[in-house]
Image (tube, helix red, strand yellow):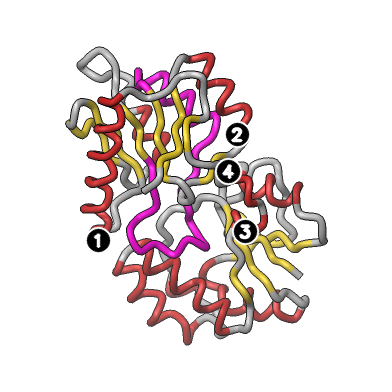
């Protein structure tokens, strides 16, 4: 049986609706997915017990999908099954989000479960390389995308974010802990007129079975409201949710979506 560990957003619902076999849906307390009622909600302080419980239910495969923010552990709420895991958890949390996520995968794998990536369950979440919209980027846009890719690669070891906005070689905004949508909304009152490229890609060395970047119709709407010229995502590294609607909105706004080979 597959267990879908769901975070916020539409991705868990999309995966559940497209999955042909029965699955078990669980959500971390405080991070319920959109339009999807989980079979179980659990707390990070009971992670050990939760893994034991789904193992007894017959779960053999686990897929993580949806957004969560950095977790904090309440030492007083940790149960007996989770207590042996806490030293590793605390060390990983101090090392950054990527280390914490990799450790969570390790806990499930140590229990004999196989980690399945969201795009493994639904391959069409990863669009083919090339322009997806009626509008295509210009040569200057391509240069800005290259600049953005270089910036994200340099910031990778700092575990900052997965996207940035660049215009004429200058970085206008960087994604941090509040995510891409917040970053784009922060440009609503930008002091210049308009223009720029939103570039999104996985962090260098990121485990692509979990926390793969995502864009969707809301990203397109926020990019258009921020006055950007378009969106460029790394081929094979960024999922496109509700692709037809995202492309329709981009065409209506006169901006482009391009999937770029790294």
Residue 247: assigned label? none
Residue topped by disc 2: 243
Q: Can you tell which of label 4 and label 1 is closer to the viewer? A: 1
- The answer, for residue 179, to whether it is visible in the render is no
Q: Disc 2 vs disc 3: Cβ atoms closer than 8 Å?
A: no
Q: Is 84 placed above or below 248 here?
A: below
From the image, give the main secondary structure of the stretch colored magenta: loop
Query: Where are the magenta residues, as a range?
Result: 200-229
Instruction: From the viewer's side, name the closer residue of 226 and 39.
Output: 226
203 in the magenta segment = yes
Q: Can you tell which of label 1 and label 2 is closer to the viewer? A: 2
**Marks 1 and 3, Cα distance to the nearest angstrom?**
26 Å
Residue topped by disc 4: 9
**Marks 4 and 2, Cα distance to the nearest angstrom?**
15 Å
Q: Residue at x 57, y 76 (%)?
A: 108
Residue topped by disc 1: 157
**Marks 1 and 2, Cα distance to the nearest angstrom?**
31 Å
How packed mark 1 is, by other alpha carbons closer than 10 Å (few <14, some 14-19, many 20 or more), is few
How packed mark 4 is, by other alpha carbons closer than 10 Å (few <14, some 14-19, many 20 or more), is some
Give the mark, 2 or 3, whose residue is nearer the N terminus: 3
Residue topped by disc 3: 120
Give SS at disc 3: helix
151 in the magenta segment = no
Give the mark, 3 or 4, whose residue is nearer the N terminus: 4
How packed mark 3 is, by other alpha carbons closer than 10 Å (few <14, some 14-19, many 20 or more), is few
Instruction: From the viewer's side, name the closer residue of 154 and 7.
Output: 154
């Amino acid at each position: 049986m597959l267990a879908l560990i769901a975070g916020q957003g539409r991705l868990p619902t999309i995966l559940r609706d497209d999955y042909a076999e029965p699955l078990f849906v669980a959500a971390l307390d405080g991070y319920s997915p959109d339009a999807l009622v989980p079979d179980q909600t659990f707390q990070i302080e009971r992670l050990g017990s939760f893994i034991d419980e789904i193992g007894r239910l017959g779960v053999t495969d686990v897929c993580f999908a949806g957004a969560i923010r950095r977790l904090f552990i309440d030492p007083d709420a940790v149960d007996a099954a989770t207590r042996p895991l806490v030293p590793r958890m605390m060390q990983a949390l101090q090392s950054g989000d990527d280390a914490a996520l990799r450790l969570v995968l390790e806990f499930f794998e140590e229990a004999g479960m196989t980690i399945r990536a969201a795009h493994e369950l639904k391959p069409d979440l990863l669009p083919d390389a090339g322009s997806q919209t009626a509008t295509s980027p210009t040569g200057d846009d391509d240069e800005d995308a290259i600049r953005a890719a270089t910036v994200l690669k340099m910031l990778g070891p700092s575990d900052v974010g997965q996207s940035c906005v660049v215009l004429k070689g200058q970085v206008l905004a960087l994604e941090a802990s509040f995510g891409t949508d917040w970053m784009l909304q922060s440009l609503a009152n930008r002091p210049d007129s308009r223009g720029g490229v939103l570039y999104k890609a996985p962090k260098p060395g990121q485990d692509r079975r979990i926390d793969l970047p995502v864009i969707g119709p809301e990203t397109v709407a926020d990019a258009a409201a921020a006055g950007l010229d378009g969106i460029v995502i790394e081929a094979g590294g960024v999922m496109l949710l509700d692709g037809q609607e995202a492309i329709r909105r981009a065409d209506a706004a006169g901006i482009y979506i391009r999937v770029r080979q790294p």
